[in-house]
Amino acid sequence: MVVLSHQSALNELFLVKTCKSTFIGVPEVDLTHPEAKTTIVKACQEFGLFKVVNHGVPLELMTHLENEALKFFMQPQSLKDKAGPPDPYGYGSKRIGTNGDLGWVEYLLLNTNPDVISPKTLQLFEQNPEMFRCGVEEYIGAVKKICCEALELMADGLEIVPRNVFSRMIRDERSDSCFRMNRYPECPELKVEALSGRNLTGFGEHTDPQIISVLRSNNTSGLQICLPDGDGDGTTWASIQPDHTSFFINVGDLLQVMTNGSFKSVKHRVLVDSSMSRLSMIYFGGPPLNEKIAPLPSLVSREEESLYRELTWLEYKNAAYKSKLSDNRLSLFDKSADHSDKSPL
Ligand SMILES: C=C1C[C@]23C[C@@]1(O)CC[C@H]2[C@@]12CC[C@H](O)[C@@](C)(C(=O)O1)[C@H]2[C@@H]3C(=O)O
Ligand SMILES: O=C(O)CCC(=O)C(=O)O
Ligand SMILES: [Fe+2]
């Protein structure tokens, strides 16, 4: 629990100046609608984000796991710490990654491949057997299905054959996907006058490095996306209205590369609410580590049009995990950039 005497620490670590932001209407997609592929492609090109409604995943399945996660987060710190520090998998608090990023968040990060289950995750499952084994597996099974359907509609919309060009990487048994549960405790101190005009960063601005991310949260707001800078007058953040019954899907870096920049890996962040805690669960769909990632030939008619060079997911992931949250990781793929005299990022 934060007390006011910690205000200066809060200031230094997490407070950002409030900048103007408005709620935007995110494109909504029913994956079974005949126009779904067109809506999805447009949303991925324009925003890099869309909302999936009428998806058929029972609300109880989502709330069951949410409640189990809350039970975990409500345990004494000493018990939670047994599942940490993250390596990168396991329990973490306030430190995000290993390169100095901080946020007003505690989280659990899991690899979804049971073959690469980390000791930290094993410890977590042993401490909370019922809680995670069933809940997490069932939930991941459901979101993975939605994720693959969405990726197949993207291929249809872009007229790419075969339509499993993206989804096969997620369905592959070696797929390097992960799953994260974030809890952003409310921060009543934000209401005191001294802090007015300030926001607290829960999760700093970044793009997701994988192919695609599927997010579900409780009804607490906080997620913001960075809008394309139409008139070039600076960064505009748009708040996303939470909806605990729906999923939000966002484009990751690898999908931006494979679509040769047509789909946008959206920059996003989370700000903390003063009176309600936010609980989010995100599935990050990634390819097998040795998968070569480059613009799809059918989207590039001449070699000169290809914006990105080829890298394996392992190469990109290793570099990404050495970077800070807000770094421009995609520049590593950038064909026009000269990387000879610099570190990878
Ligand atoms: C600061 C970092 C945390 C992160 C690894 C990184 O070095 C840069 C990318 C970060 C990110 C963002 C999306 C996902 O939440 C995540 C699990 C991922 O794959 O890349 C996190 C990483 C993390 O929290 O370890
Ligand atoms: O917690 C959220 O709502 C989003 C977090 C996020 O962007 C991430 O974990 O990569
Ligand atoms: Fe993210």
Image: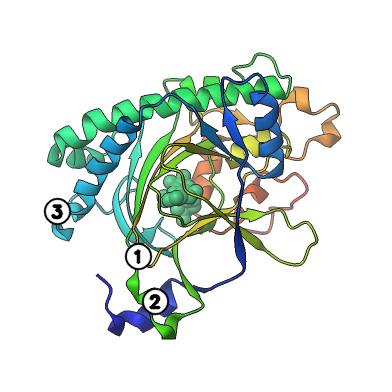
The quarter in which the N terminus is drawn is bottom left
Residue furthest top in the image: 162
17 vs 78: above or below: below
Q: Are marks 2 and 3 in contact (CB under 8 Å)?
A: no
Between discs 3 and 1, the one toward the N terminus: 3
Q: Are marks 2 and 1 in contact (CB under 8 Å)?
A: yes
Where does label 3 land, which residue?
79
Left or right, 181 with respect to 315, comes to: left
Residue type pointed to by label 2: Lys
What secondary structure is found at the residue carrying circle 1?
A: loop
Left or right, 97 with respect to 52, comes to: left
| Measured Cα–Cα span from mark 2 to mark 1 | 9 Å
Between discs 2 and 3, the one toward the N terminus: 3
Q: Residue 307 lies in what quarter of the image? A: top right
Where does label 2 land, which residue?
191
Where does label 1 land, which residue?
275
Residue type pointed to by label 3: Leu
Q: Position of residue 65 (x, y in %)?
A: 28, 37
Mark nearer the viewer, 3 or 1? 1
Q: Residue 295 lies in what quarter of the image? A: top right
